Image: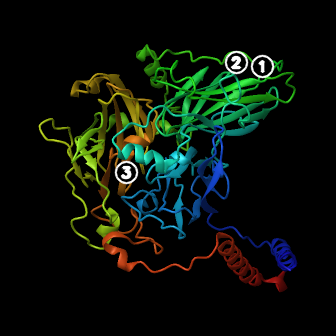
Amino acid sequence: MAAAYLFSRFTTFSFLFSLALLCGFSLAGDPSVSYVFEVSYITASPLGVPQQVIAINGKFPGPVINATTNYNVDVNVFNRLDEPFLFTWNGIEIRGESWQDGVLGTNCPIPPNWNFTYSFQVKDQIGSFFYFPSLSLQRASGGFGPIIINNRDRIPIPFNEPDGEISFMIGDWYTQNHTALRGVLDSGEELGMPDGVLINGKGPYKYTSSVPDGIQYETINVDPGKTYRIRVHNVGTSTSLNFRIQNHKMLLVETEGHYNSQTNFTDFDIHVGQSYSFLVTMDQNASTDYYIVASARFVNETAWQRVTGVGILHYSNSKGQASGPLPVPATDVSQPWSVMNQQRAIKQNTSASGARPNPQGSYHYGEINITGTYILRSIPPTKINGSVRATLNGISFLNPSTPMRLADKHKVNGVYKLDFPERPADNIPPRLESSIINATYKGFIQIIFQNNDTKVQSFHIDGYSFYVVAMDFGNWTDDKKGSYNNWDAVSRSTVEVYPGAWTAVLLSLDNAGVWNIRVQNLDRWYLGQETYMRIINPEENGSTEMDQPGNALYCGALKSMQKDQIHSSATSILNEKLNLVFSLVMVLLALVPVFFC
């Protein structure tokens, strides 16, 4: 009966739609894409051990969000987990809408069996990004997926149209789920060596006898002579990975939404939370398949041999299976200068257009006066009030029970402090605080990420891309500004900082709201290594920051304002939305002046 009903509706719609087209009627409106994400646990065995993973619509990893510059994106999330949940959109700037950012400083969590619809615009953006759960180490159990923002048709990409696209979600993986890993960190211990590396949610190909039998691995089917755009995201817990495809060169073309000066690599280091696009041409003979490898970096690679993901690149005319030893990276981590130089080689393509028709290099960031400097120093975890915590400038961030922008809107005082220190102070003991940066709208600041910890860290700023103007070993000092790249530095949202080193970034504070600054390594983030920037336009008239959305959830001091939800299934609500859309379309079509055609 349901099928007949849908068919009758489709027939009616088709008739009126065809009539509308004949009369020159246009159905064009604001471009948008909509998704329904049902978040639930499933059982999977990516490394041969059955475990609970977080799936989206039954898939692990989750489905791709595919949009085009300036599209509106709606994601209706149904939380079927047994704990609160939030999505965040890694690298999506969500201009003027930090309400949609999906982190605890801006959003109340979605309770179990509740739903919430994120609505945001991918304004003036193109490129490769991903989404993931932002709470309580949940990303260590999955829940992530790719985001692709395409160029508008009138803005050409700075390379020939590829013959196809392939996304890789790579990351270190534990056979314990996120709740068990939380227990490890809560006990004051380190997480230790991961159990492996996954490629698109799958374990390694059996390239050696140490890999157990029966593990499902990723196979990528390609045609000889064709060129593919390969988007690679490190969605792991805490391990930097080196990505390579045996005997194939990878032409780097895009970094987190900005086109690069094109450079060939045989392998490339991708740190936690980072995204890249490469062009890879299938120009090898097909005597055998080829290895796709993602292996741990900046560790004892002999001891960490099991932390290696291996997939297979299969030509359509391949004559045999891949065999023999895995290819090794060209750079040696025992020579840190050579490793850093690979990252320094990433330059912006200043002549290419990005999301807008004007060239990416038309914004002369190097000619703007710096109005403020923040040095954010990380050190190894330390005990605060008897618990092991991670810090920035001696502060381990304590997320308030009431999101900060919500507290501002409803005039709830005492939720947070605007006193985050601009520089580290050695004479003040580490402490727990809800302390954030009081930044100035339209300021132009430099942030120095100083890593005095013992492991590589990746730092991310929500709501922004920044120019990576310099990185070096040692401690940053003011005279280092003379080494800045003020012409063609890459603009991105997540940058690596090597142990015992610093990275300097420049950014223009033109996106009003409250925005998260965090380490992407989940263990340190969970232990408090984050803060926020509060950026308020003093002349706000609704044009630079959107008002609180009507569906905002309430919690903390405002929990009494939250109304109960009627808990329907995702399927039934989707059907209700389809019926509503159909009804609206029918009304519009009824207005077509049929009699005047």
Q: Nearer the viewer, residue 44 or 514?
A: 44
Q: Nearer the viewer, residue 328 or 581?
A: 328
Please, what is the three-letter code of the amino acid marked with disc 2? Asn
| Residue at 55 percent of width and 34 percent of height | 195
Give how far apart the Cα atoms at labels 3 and 2 are. 40 Å
Please, what is the three-letter code of the amino acid marked with disc 1? Gln
| Residue at 34 percent of width and 49 percent of height | 509
Q: Circles 3 and 1: CB distance less than 8 Å? A: no
Give how far apart the Cα atoms at labels 3 and 1 are. 44 Å
Q: Please identify the quadrant where the C terminus is shown.
A: bottom right
Q: Which of 535 and 28 is in front in this view?
A: 535
Q: Circles 3 and 2: CB distance less than 8 Å? A: no
Circle on res. 247 = 2
Query: Which tag, 3 or 1, sits closer to the chain's start?
Result: 1
| Residue at 29 percent of width and 48 percent of height | 443
Residue 547 x %, y %? 40, 70
Please, what is the three-letter code of the amino acid marked with disc 3? Asn
| Residue at 46 percent of width and 58 percent of height | 102
Circle on res. 284 = 1
Residue 35 x %, y %? 64, 62
Q: Circles 2 and 1: CB distance less than 8 Å? A: yes
Q: Please identify the quadrant where the N terminus is shown.
A: bottom right
Can you identify the residue that label 3 sits on? 516
Quadrant in the picture for residue 98? bottom left
Quadrant in the picture for residue 260? top right
